[in-house]
């Protein structure tokens, strides 16, 4: 079913983002280091909780969550970066792009679930979209001079 394919793509993105966000968290440099270091930590903590919640929701529905890194790398629509040094603005631009993609995918899953009458999935993903909106607002405000 399309909805579970999308949820596994989303789960794969969460797995990739866990590693990618740690790269940003460790390797950001600049005057706002502490602020961005702490901001990226708040996001990876949040996404790691979502990683478990989404996999459990797939299980609750009697479907199979992907469990292997190799599958996550293949299915993820968010890609890793080869870089290992980032300015604070670069981090914010990467976050803006990736969280916008996550918001779009979460919205798509929410709408597919709504069409299928899966209101528990609707409720879960509405919360995700709300969280991305808040972080995207923070990012936009930080990028505005
Ligand atoms: Fe840390």
Image (cartoon, grey):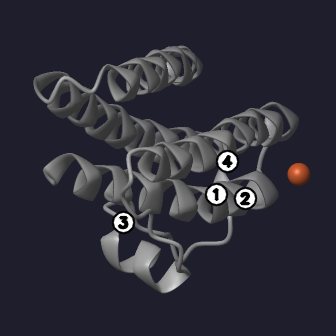
Q: Which of marks 1 and 4 is nearer the N terminus?
A: 1
In-image side of 115 versus 19 (left or right): left
Q: Residues within 10 Å of mark 1 (few under 14, many from 20)?
A: some
Q: Name the residue under label 2.
A: 22
Q: Is 105 located above or below residue 145 in the figure? A: below
**Which type of secondary structure does the marked residue at label 1 adopt?**
helix
Query: As rendered, which of 100 and 117 lies closer to the eye?
Result: 117
Mark 2 in CB contact with mark 1 (< 8 angstroms): yes
Q: CB atoms at circles 1 and 4 under 8 Å apart?
A: yes
The disc, 2 or 4, on the residue closer to the chain's N-terminal end is 2
Residue 48 is tagged as 4
Quadrant assignment for the N terminus: bottom left
Q: Earlier in the sequence, mark 1 or mark 3?
A: 1
Is ligand 1 less than 8 Å from the beta carbon at label 2?
Answer: yes
Q: Can residue 31 be seen in this view?
A: no
Q: SS of the residue at dot 2?
A: helix
Nearer-N-terminus badge (2/3): 2
- The residue drawn where x is 47% and y is 85% is 70
Measure the C-alpha gap from mark 1 to mark 3: 12 Å
**Rendering coords of residue 38 (x, y %):** 82, 35
Left or right of 27, for residue 13: left
- Please give the count of numbered marks on the rendered protein: 4
* Residue labelled 1 has its Cβ within 8 Å of some atom of ligand 1: no
Instruction: Identify residue for label 3.
Output: 76
Q: How far apart are marks 2 and 1 (CA)?
A: 6 Å
């Amino acid at each position: 079913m399309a909805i579970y394919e999308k949820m596994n793509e989303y789960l794969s993105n969460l797995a990739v983002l866990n590693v990618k966000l740690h790269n940003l968290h460790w390797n950001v440099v600049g005057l706002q280091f502490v602020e961005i270091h702490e901001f990226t930590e708040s996001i990876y903590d949040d996404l790691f909780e979502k990683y478990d919640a989404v996999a459990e929701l797939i299980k609750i529905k009697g479907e199979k969550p992907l469990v292997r890194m190799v599958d996550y790398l293949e299915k993820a629509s968010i890609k890793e970066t080869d870089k290992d040094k980032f300015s604070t603005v670069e981090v914010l631009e990467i976050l803006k792009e990736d969280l916008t993609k996550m918001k779009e995918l979460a919205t798509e899953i929410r709408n597919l679930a709504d069409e299928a009458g899966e209101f528990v999935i609707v409720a879960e993903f509405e919360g995700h979209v709300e969280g991305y909106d808040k972080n995207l607002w923070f990012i936009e405000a930080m990028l505005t001079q």
